[in-house]
Image (spheres, rainbow, N blue to C red):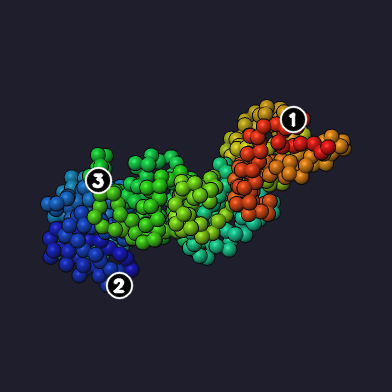
Amino acid sequence: MNARILVIDDEQDQCDLMALVLEGDGSSVRACTSAREALQHLIGEDFDVVLTDLGMSEMGGIEVCKRIAEMKPGLPVIVVTGNASLEAAIAAMRAGAYDFVTKPISDPELVKLAVARAVEHRRLRSELKLLRDEVEAAAAPSGIVGSSAAMRRVNDLIARISTGDVSVLVQGETGTGKELVARRIHATGRRKDGPFVAVNCAAIPPSLLESELFGHARGAFTDAKAQRAGLFVQAHRGTLFLDEIGEMPLAMQAKLLRALQERTVRPVGADVEVPFDARLVTATNRDLEEEVEQKRFREDLFYRINVVRISVPPLRERSSDVLELAHYFLRRHAERGGKPSLGIVPEAAKKLVAYGWPGNVRELENCMERAVALARFDQVTVADLPEKIGAYVPDHFAVVADDVDEILSLDEVDRRYVSRALAILGDNKTRASELLGIDRRTLYRRIERWEELQKAPASPDGSGALGSKPT
């Protein structure tokens, strides 16, 4: 069978007997005379099947089944009992058991057969999940939607890191699709057969975040009625995605750093360290380098998670992708609603491309879902778009002037251009400095100087400290 088997029985001779029966043919057995010790092993180790005695003094087999169902859903449990009554079998099945065998063991082959069936059952369930994932992946676009140069760079970077296990930091504004990038990293990597576990650090109260990530022991706090594996352990052999990591409190950042350095976690209320094997992908809509300078994010943690950085551009920076995305969302929501696919009239297409999309891809999808619901014809018109998009008139920044009185100083042109770049980039100074081709500190110094000049009193001719006209 080549299976990893966990045997739980408070009688040592019964553990030895089960190990003797089941070991061999490539299988390995870990036997425990303590149910609590066995559950602790389940946190950090992977087993194919569990055999537990029904009548144990420390913790009964029914309770063990319930705990395992909570900790490791899908892990088959076989109950071993000396009571062959129907009531015992029903109670075990209701508690989550896959099968039960009776003792004393008169025919070892029956035990082997039960274990083999349980292992095969788990394998088939895993294959079914994998097939479902593949079907969903086939139904989705082959990559991240968008053929602009910016998105080609993102896809290229994802492909280049697919064979490794480096930590990845995904940066981008809200709604740009950072989780989609994280899922793509997982789906194309060597851990694609493992779980993808995602959590939004900003959505969990700070008091509960440690328990969510690292797990907790039973009784660790008021509501901890059962032992629970944390997300690091749940992501074993897969990928853990920590969204909005910039919102994580400093105290929790220190614990996260230690976990990443040691590759172990300590569940809340537990006495032992639990190893984990998961790839870490993080995401943020903040400028973490600025957060480090402001002492709101640990510098050592930043370098730990920022081995490879992928910047997801906002939609306004890849306007050539807008119509491709719009058609994709129209098809998807039309299929979900059982409606025919829609086109887009040229006037509406111009409005979509011109609009700034402050909500990024998420806002565009919402707009297309609305259009599918409201469209009266086989094409989306301007009337089917939200009013603010249909009435949108772009503002253009022009440097060239035709009148001598409109000519600006180079410093003012510089200030306006930098201000416009920051507005487009959502005030992300790190990205702005990269695109403008200047050092971040130089950009900070310029901004500080302009702010000081703005506060300075106006000159006698009324021209002010900024934008003064040449005489």
Give the structural element (helix, strand or loop) at label 3: loop
Residue for point 17% across, 64% down: 15
Q: Nearer the viewer, residue 107 or 236?
A: 236
Placement of 26 over or under 259, stated as above or below: below
- Labelled disc at residue 220: 3
What is the distance, in whole Å, between disc 1 and disc 3 at their CAs?
A: 70 Å
Q: Is residue 371 visible?
A: yes
Q: Amino acid at mark 3?
A: Ala
Answer left or right for 232 relative to 151: left
What is the distance, in whole Å, between disc 2 and disc 1 at their CAs?
A: 95 Å
Residue for point 50% across, 65% down: 164
Q: Are marks 1 and 3 in contact (CB under 8 Å)?
A: no
> Who comes first in sequence, dot 2 or dot 1?
2
Q: Amino acid at mark 2?
A: Asp
* Residue 286 picture location, percent across and down: 53, 45
Instruction: Count residues near mark 1 (Cα–Cα under 10 Å), then give few for <14, some for 14-19, many for 20+.
Output: few
- Labelled disc at residue 25: 2
In which quadrant will I find the C terminus?
top right
What is the distance, in whole Å, between disc 2 and disc 3 at their CAs?
A: 40 Å
Residue for point 31% across, 60% down: 45
Answer left or right for 45 relative to 247: left
Which marked residue is nearer to the observer: mark 2 or mark 3? 3
Q: Amino acid at mark 1?
A: Pro
Disc 1: which residue? 460
Answer left or right for 319 relative to 259: right
Give the structural element (helix, strand or loop) at label 2: loop
> Who comes first in sequence, dot 2 or dot 3?
2
* Residue 98 picture location, percent across and down: 28, 52
In which quadrant will I find the N terminus?
bottom left
